[in-house]
Image (cartoon, rainbow, N blue to C red):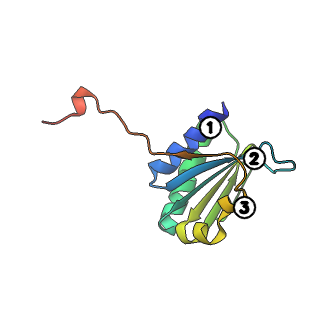
């Protein structure tokens, strides 16, 4: 189930043109505040907000509760807490500055790519 949720979040990020999605598995870290971080970035503050809104919408559709969210308004770094997953949506410059992944360099990580959508025969043009 967690794999599904992580993929759902990654897809929601890419739907709004978020970039460089990675998850960090914190389950073996004693005292960690969550099981997983999902980290991504976006090009501008409008896009950061759009990514956050889309993640929240998709997670709600799947029955997940957003316990807490911070950073709306300035949209430089929005954090969404879903309990076992915390999503970090950065403005690119802020992600580069804070280097959150480097703080957790020793944990397993997984990168996510944009899924390619197969076109059906009715959608192709000649």
Residue 77 image offset from top left, x and y in percent: 62, 65
Residue 34 image offset from top left, x and y in percent: 77, 47
Residue located 81% across and 51% down the image: 33
Report, in whole angstroms, how far the alpha carbon at label 1 lies from the one at label 2. Answer: 15 Å
Q: Which residue is mark 2?
A: 26
Mark 1 and mark 2 lie on one chain; the one further toward the N terminus is 1
Q: Report crowding for label 2: few under 14, some 14 to 19, many 20 or more residues within 10 A (C-alpha).
A: many
Residue closer to the observer: 125 or 64: 125
Instruction: Point out which mark residue 83 bears.
Output: none
Q: Secondary structure at mark 2?
A: loop
Residue located 57% across and 44% down the image: 9
Residue closer to the observer: 25 or 120: 25
Q: Is residue 17 visible?
A: yes
Mark 2 and mark 3 lie on one chain; the one further toward the N terminus is 2
Judge from the rendering whether residue 31 lies leftward or rightward of residue 13; answer left or right: right
Discs 3/1, front: 3
Mark 3 and mark 1 lie on one chain; the one further toward the N terminus is 1
Residue closest to the far left? 126
Judge from the rendering whether residue 72 lies leftward or rightward of residue 21; answer left or right: right
């Amino acid at each position: 189930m967690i794999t599904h949720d992580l993929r759902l979040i990654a897809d929601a990020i890419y739907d709004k043109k978020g970039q460089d999605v990675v998850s960090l598995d914190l389950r073996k870290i004693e005292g960690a505040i969550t099981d997983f971080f999902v980290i991504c970035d976006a090009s501008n503050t409008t896009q950061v907000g759009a990514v956050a809104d889309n993640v929240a919408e998709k997670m709600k559709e799947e029955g997940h509760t957003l316990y807490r969210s911070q950073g709306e308004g300035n949209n430089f770094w929005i954090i969404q807490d879903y309990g076992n997953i915390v999503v970090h949506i950065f403005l690119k410059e802020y992600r580069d500055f804070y280097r959150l992944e480097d703080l957790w360099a020793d944990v397993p990580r997984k990168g996510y790519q944009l899924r390619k959508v197969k076109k059906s025969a009715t959608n192709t043009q000649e």
